Image (cartoon, rainbow, N blue to C red):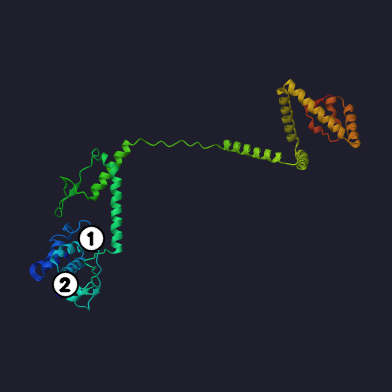
Amino acid sequence: MADTIDTIYTMDTIDTAYKYVTIDTVDTIDMVDAINIIATKDTIEAADTIHSEHIHTIDTVDELVMIVITIAMCVAAVQDQNQVAEVKTKLLKPKLWKAEIRPDRELTTNTACSRSRRPCAKMRVLIPPLLRWKIPRNIERRRRRRANKKRNLLKGLEPLSEAETEVVVPAAKTVQAQPIGQDPTILEEEGKQEEDDPTENHRWFAAAYAAGLRQAPPETEPQVTHPSSADRAATKRARSAEQQRIRRANLTAWQTERRRAKDKERQRARRARLTDSQRAGVRDADLTRVQQRRAEQSTTDRTATNAVNHEQYSSRRSEQSEADRDIGRERSRVRRKAPKKCQGHVNHEGFRASMVKVKDVVDGRHRLPPTTI
């Protein structure tokens, strides 16, 4: 038997190994039965009787020899002939063994029948216990993962079962081999396709997906309005104004006085830096604003404003010192020297003739617009 195994192992193709075993070189009937189950005269993939999911992975002579040796050893180890079929069914699934080259060992009956992991001729086959079959962990994880993928695929195909009758799947076409020099002819395949044909599954899946897209209503995306720069600026100004109002409301009395003094000094410095054209623009804007505010005031508002102003003037006069009163008297004296009451600021020492335009000069006298002193 060792010579037979050595000869099979040196074969380069499966067909050669099959012919060598079936001619009557091997006397063991179990070895011949194993070869008949595992391989056929044409290809190893045609042996669907073993396992339709894993048989296509046996594509080399090494794997075929390992399966044959495993079956032969297990059949010899089983005394009860009723367990032969069960042992073959369990061991005829690939990827359940490990092999290693051991050229310095010989095959014996004890090593073949023993359940321990002892090496045999040319290779060492690790045989799990026959009565207490246990699949390796990596094989079990692989099987569980494949089963989960298959179950998930079936779950995903359930919603498409209703539209299966409505979907028209184009018929598959096969190309038949022709002699060299002739064009291949494409013939339409008749009959039902195999269930595990990946090309057919892809076509059916694509057609079902296209049909679902045609039936599903188009999704309308909600219109998102982005605020413009003007809106963002207005929102920022409103937020800043609210923050300033809250900050001013929380100020104490001495903080308010200090803020007013700083603002007054800042305004004085800003007015000193203004040019003549800028001062004219500021005066025009202030005059327009005051006139517009007075025009929009009602009689009640005007009366209330005058009352507030009289109250402010009275409190200011009561708080004036003797020096402040002297300054006020000097201003009144200058005002009385002016040609008109409305031109009193002309005689001030800070007056500049460039402030007066040509159209305001009449007979060498300055005719300025009315002012409030």
The quarter of the displayed image where residue 61 is located? bottom left
Q: Pointers 1 and 2 in contact (CB under 8 A)?
A: no
For badge 1, the amino acid type reads Thr
Q: Is residue 229 left or right of residue 104?
A: right
- In the depicted view, which residue is nearer to us: 132 or 275? 132
Q: Which mark identifies residue 11?
A: none
Residue of label 2:
5
Secondary structure type for disc 1: helix
Q: Height in image: 59 above or below 121? A: above
Secondary structure type for disc 2: helix
- Give percent across and percent down for residue 142: 29, 59
Who comes first in sequence, dot 1 or dot 2? Answer: 2
For label 2, the crowd category at 10 Å Cα-Cα, with few meaning under 14, some 14 to 19 and many 20 or more, is some
In the picture, the quarter occupied by the N terminus is bottom left
Residue at the image position 8 percent from the left and 68 percent from the top? 23
- Give percent across and percent down for residue 305: 76, 26
For badge 2, the amino acid type reads Ile
Residue of label 1:
57
Residue at the image position 82 percent from the left and 27 percent from the top? 310
The residue sitting at the bottom extreme is 104
Q: Height in image: 355 above or below 179? A: above
Residue at the image position 31 percent from the left and 60 percent from the top? 141
In the picture, the quarter occupied by the C terminus is top right
Q: Is residue 268 left or right of residue 94?
A: right
